[in-house]
Image (tube, rainbow, N blue to C red):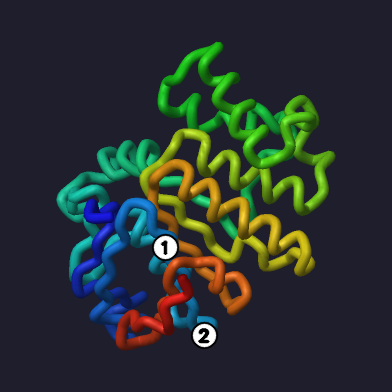
Amino acid sequence: MTDSIVRLENLSKRFSKDRPAIFAGVDLTVRAGEYVAVMGESGVGKSTLLNLLAGLDRTDSGRVLLEGVDLAALNDDAVTLLRRRAVGFVFQAFHVLPYLSVEQNVALPLDLLGIAEPQRGERARDMLRAVGIEPLARRHARELSGGEIQRVAIARALVHRPRLVLADEPTGNLDTGSAVQILALLRAQVKANAGAGILITHSRMAADTADRILVLDAHGLRALEATR
């Protein structure tokens, strides 16, 4: 694995000029095929870090390079287009649209990329098959269980084959058995797509599914230990 999917260089972020930085001196390289977990106490900026990685927020200093492109050098429209193509998000709150069908929810990223039918539907159904919920394709999202909704969210994040998958506490509200299944599924799909994945979690059990574990604090990122 030599090609860098995302690279952070001396990254810092603060919410206002009269407050100290949330974190500073963050350096990170994640390569193709690599799945990384980031842990840390509440309030250290883990979700903020994901937003910076995806270009949803701007850094105060340092650089975020996605596939070699410096996000700071792009205007908002260009960042949006790059994120739409190259990033898949699994949000903590999932943001599945309740009045759309499961297939329609999963196909949304393809629709935004201008992929037409029948290819859009075929790829959405292939992804639903991969996460084990293809029989639910015509069901409305509001009719699903929590575990099923999480599988929809993962399928939607991966359907456009992004180079970078960002997952923010994807199993925070699940029982242990369901969490284990979801984490295995997420890891397997990141690996199958030959992309890179970053998992934000409080759970050591979840972090142990990653290739390496990092801890975020005010001084940056440090390695916890190699897990594989």
At a point 73% along the width and 28% down the height, the residue shown is: 137
Mark 2 residue element: loop
Residue carrying label 2: 41
Instruction: Quarter of the image for the N terminus: give it.
Output: bottom left
Q: Local crowd at mark 2 within 10 Å, few (<14), some, or many (≥20)?
A: few
Looking at numbered disc 1 in the image, what kind of residue is underneath it? Answer: Leu
Which of 24/202 is in front? 202
Percent across and percent down for residue 181 are 70, 57
> Disc 1 vs disc 2: Cβ atoms closer than 8 Å?
no
Residue 44 seen in the figure = yes
Q: Is residue 9 above or below residue 89?
A: below
Q: Is residue 87 above or below residue 139?
A: below
At a point 37% along the width and 54% down the height, the residue shown is: 54
Residue 56 seen in the figure = no
Outermost residue to the left: 73
Hey, which quadrant is residue 131 in on the image? top right
Q: Give the distance between the C-alpha atoms of the residues marked 1 and 2, in whole angstroms.
A: 15 Å
Hey, which quadrant is residue 183 in on the image? bottom right
Which of 114/196 is in front? 196
Q: Is residue 31 above or below residue 27?
A: above
Mark 1 residue element: helix
Residue carrying label 1: 50
